[in-house]
Image: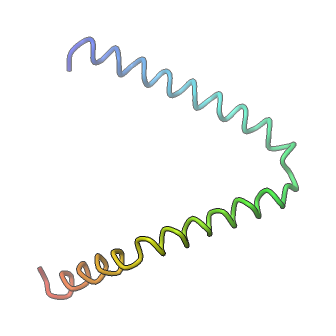
Amino acid sequence: MSTTMTRTATRAAGAAARLGREVATRLAGLRGSDRGDVPGWVMVTLMTAGLVVALWAVAGPRLAQVFSTAMDRVLSGG
């Protein structure tokens, strides 16, 4: 690896570590003020379920085909 690539990788790793610490610090500060926010968690859960249903409706037949093909290959040994 060249010296320039090594420096760039080192800088990127340092930046990622600083970002991780910053996010952890901010999340720790929010933890106390977010306690008991049931409506927020319910909304996140419902939105996630909605996304899954929407994606399943669009990609369901293709996913079923991919699964069937994979199972056929596993069961036939090839």
* Quadrant position of the N terminus in the picture: top left
Q: Please tell me which residue is depicted at 85% across the width and 43% down the height of the picture.
A: 32
Image quarter of residue 68: bottom left
Residue 10 pos. (x, y %): 39, 19
Would you place residue 47 above or below residue 6 in this image? below
Please name the residue shown 53% across and 27% down the image. Answer: 17
Q: Is residue 13 above or below residue 76?
A: above
Applied colour scheme: rainbow
Q: Is residue 70 left or right of residue 64?
A: left
Which image quarter is the C terminus in?
bottom left
Determine whether 69 is above or below 1 in the image.
below
Q: Position of residue 21 (x, y in %)?
A: 62, 29
- Residue depicted at x 84% and y 47%: 34
Quarter where residue 64 is shown: bottom left
Query: Relative to residue 66, is residue 35 drawn left or right?
Result: right
Could you tell me residue 56's position as x and y percent? 48, 73
Please tell me in which quadrant of the rendered image residue 42 appears. bottom right
Residue lying at the far front in this picture: please name it: 58
Residue 69 vs residue 34, the one in the foreground? 69
